[in-house]
Structures are given as structure tokens and as C-alpha cells.
């Protein structure tokens, strides 16, 4: 079975996961606990939102339910995914949780993972 590398930016963490594994499966790998926070694992809570920095084409296409939910949460559906709903088909680099606010997929310059339109 083919395995694919899931890299977590900033934390110098890399995980090898089998084809079609969900990103949240790193929870079962050594050093993987808590890297991607999650709750429901069914696409309903939004706890597992991550930002894809590289390799978006190596993920399942985003379904309408995931797209609608990501946008309802106020994130950009072009670069954000629900880790619990996203399966790997190749090497991918993501920013997760506390580090996700540090990167944009294209420029590697600071940006925010905060939902759009939210005013302090
Ligand atoms: S864990 Fe709830 S949406 Fe992914």
C-alpha cells in the first residue's frame, strides 16, 4: 500500500499515512497527538480546520457540504479544509491549529486563519 507524506509546517513534523487516510489519522502516529485538533470527525464541528500550504491537488476534491461548511465558518474554501473529511493521495503540507495563522499557501507571508468578516 502506498504511503504519503503529510508535513506540518513550522513544527518540523512529518507523518507517513496510507493512501486515502484522513489527515486526522496522524492522531494514531507517534508524536501525532494534538497536532490537528478535532472533535466530531464527521464534518460537523469545524474544530479540525487546517490550511493547505502545498499539495492541494493531492487531496480529495472538496464536496459541497465541506465547501459550504468551511465558508459558513468564514474561511476561504480554496485553501482551507476539514482535516477529518480530507483524504490523502500524495504529499501535502499543511498548517494546523496554532500555526495556521502564520502562512498563506502562495506567498509564505503572514496572514490570518481567522474567519473572514470577523471584527474584534
Ligand atoms: S472534527 Fe469536527 S469537523 Fe472535523
Image (cartoon, rainbow, N blue to C red):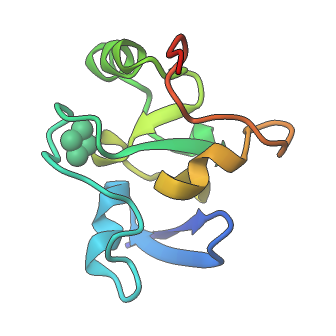
**Residue 87 can be seen, yes or no:** yes
Residue 3 horizontal/vertical position (percent): 46, 71
User: Which quarter holds ligand 1?
Assistant: top left
**Tally of numbered tags:** 0
| Residue lying furthest front | 120
Identified at 26% across, 78% down, the residue is: 28
49 or 116, which is in the foreground?
A: 116
Res. 46 image quadrant: top left
Q: Is residue 9 left or right of residue 28?
A: right
90 or 104, which is in the foreground?
A: 104
Identified at 44% across, 28% down, the residue is: 61
Quadrant (top left, top right, bottom left, bottom right) of the N terminus = bottom left
95 or 61, which is in the foreground?
A: 95
Residue 73 horizontal/vertical position (percent): 36, 20
Q: Is residue 109 left or right of residue 74?
A: right
Identified at 47% across, 76% down, the residue is: 16
98 or 108, which is in the foreground?
A: 98
Q: Is residue 49 left or right of residue 55?
A: left
Instruction: Note whether 82 is above or below 120 in the view shown.
Output: below
Residue 114 horizontal/vertical position (percent): 53, 31
**Residue 94 can be seen, yes or no:** no
Amino acid at each position: 500500500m502506498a504511503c504519503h507524506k503529510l508535513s506540518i509546517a513550522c513544527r518540523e513534523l512529518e507523518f507517513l499515512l496510507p493512501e486515502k487516510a484522513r489527515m486526522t489519522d496522524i492522531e494514531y502516529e507517534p508524536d501525532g497527538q494534538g497536532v490537528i485538533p478535532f472533535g466530531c470527525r464527521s464534518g460537523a464541528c469545524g474544530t479540525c480546520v487546517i490550511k493547505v500550504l502545498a499539495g492541494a491537488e493531492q487531496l480529495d476534491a472538496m464536496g459541497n457540504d465541506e465547501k459550504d461548511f468551511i465558508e459558513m465558518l468564514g474561511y476561504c474554501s480554496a485553501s482551507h479544509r476539514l482535516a477529518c473529511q480530507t483524504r490523502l493521495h500524495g504529499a501535502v503540507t499543511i498548517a494546523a491549529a496554532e500555526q495556521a495563522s502564520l502562512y498563506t499557501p502562495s506567498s509564505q507571508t503572514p496572514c490570518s486563519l481567522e474567519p473572514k468578516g470577523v471584527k474584534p
